[in-house]
Image (cartoon, rainbow, N blue to C red):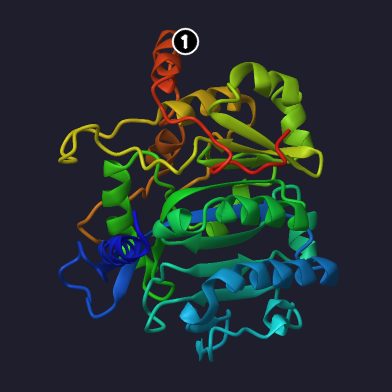
Amino acid sequence: MDKQALIEWAKNAQTDALLKGGMLLPKQRHDYIGAAMVVRAALFFPNAYQEAVQGEIANCFAAYSAYVGPRLHWLTQDGRKPVQLKDGQVDPKAFRARGDAGVTAYVSSGEKADDAGLWEFRVFGTLEYEEAMPEGGASALTFSVPAPFLVAEPRAFQQLFVDFAKRLNAYNGYAGFAVNLSLTEAEANTPTEYWLARRHIALDVGNPLLNATHLRAKLKTVSWLTCLDKTLLEQVGGISALRSELPPDWYALYDMNGGVVIQAGPEAESGGAADEAGKGPPVAPANYVILNNALKAVRATTVWRLQRGLMGAAAPYFDTTAESDDWLRRFDVDENSLLDYKARLLKMPKLTSATALPDHL
């Protein structure tokens, strides 16, 4: 693909990835972008109330914004009105705690403050007393890019994910296809996310910043990139156990402060239908199913509810704990089926020096 063809493909892909607000709720307003299909990372980490960690959050944003530049248009913080950015610049002080409030910063490329963006960087930090509670959960940071970025900047996303996980000393995290929802109108657009998730089984569901309450010691899901700290790595048997389950032609392992980041395949998988028309049932990617089995000892069994929607809305979403927990088990298979997925893995694209980072374990 030459440069001009890449540009045209990227434009079309980004347009297709943007969905109007309240798409499945006719009585809601529709004059904004309600959802954006992206590749998104979610990292769950401790000590966001500490100045040193807040400095690392600012460093993470600086590394991310080096790729995004002036595409970022809005900064929103809890309790404050959205601020329009000039040339995508955000003062590092935005990532500092304010008084009794924790760190909150939501940066988006949306044209309007209500728009979901293809490029977004969000962080929510828990307070010290909250983190001291046994069920206090974790702080969370997410960043996203449009899918064409992975083609235009090979390995850049993987490098950002590994670097950020190290900087934040993450408990765990993951990255793959997801849906960014409008910050101000999220509940009106959860049915859109639900609709997409029913068609793409590997799509992440729910706001990671809200799910973080349950993700200090357990992993929500496996994905293209999956991160475990040292404690979680030990619980799955260490690097040697992972190597025995994850063939190096399809999986790369990277050090993360004594823990590990696992890359499953050369690119993110959406888990859509097998037929080209996209009309069949979604198919779980074999590399995700195998990884899911290898990490079953540390996977979360519940996150309570994946989504929050409008009361009384007719369009469905993951509203109950039972349905949400069932989604967490979507890659679970029995031993006989696992052998079938291992056979399918052999037909999937292998990692190359162009798609994996050089400093793998």
Q: Which residue is drawn at 75% across and 47% down?
A: 134
Residue reaching furthest to the front: 2
Q: How many labels does the image show?
A: 1
Residue reaching furthest to the top: 336
Above or below for 201 versus 29: above
Above or below for 40 versus 298: below
Quickly name the residue at label 1: 335
> Residue 189 or 315: which is nearer the viewer?
189
Decide if residue 306 is in sight here: no
Q: Position of residue 168 (x, y in %)?
A: 75, 57
Above or below for 291 versus 210: above
Q: Where is residue 129 in the image (x, y as percent from the top left)?
A: 79, 63
Q: In which quarter of the image is residue 273?
A: top left
Amino acid at circle 1: Glu
Q: Is 348 on the left or on the right of 127, as rendered?
A: left
Q: Is 48 on the left or on the right of 141, as rendered?
A: right
Helix, strand, or loop for circle 1? helix
Q: Where is residue 69 in the image (x, y as percent from the top left)?
A: 54, 78
Q: Where is residue 299 in the image (x, y as percent from the top left)?
A: 59, 33
> Residue 197 or 325: which is nearer the viewer?
197
> Residue 316 or 221: which is nearer the viewer?
221
Above or below for 276 versus 204: above
Q: Which residue is drawn at 62% across and 61% down?
A: 141
Q: Residue at x 36, y 73 (%)?
A: 185
Decide if residue 93 is in sight here: yes
Q: How crowded is mark 1: few (under 14 residues within 10 Å), some or many (20 or more)?
A: few
Q: Is 238 on the left or on the right of 314, as rendered?
A: right
Task: For the C terminus, give its image quadrant.
Answer: top right
Q: Residue at x 50, y 82 (%)?
A: 70
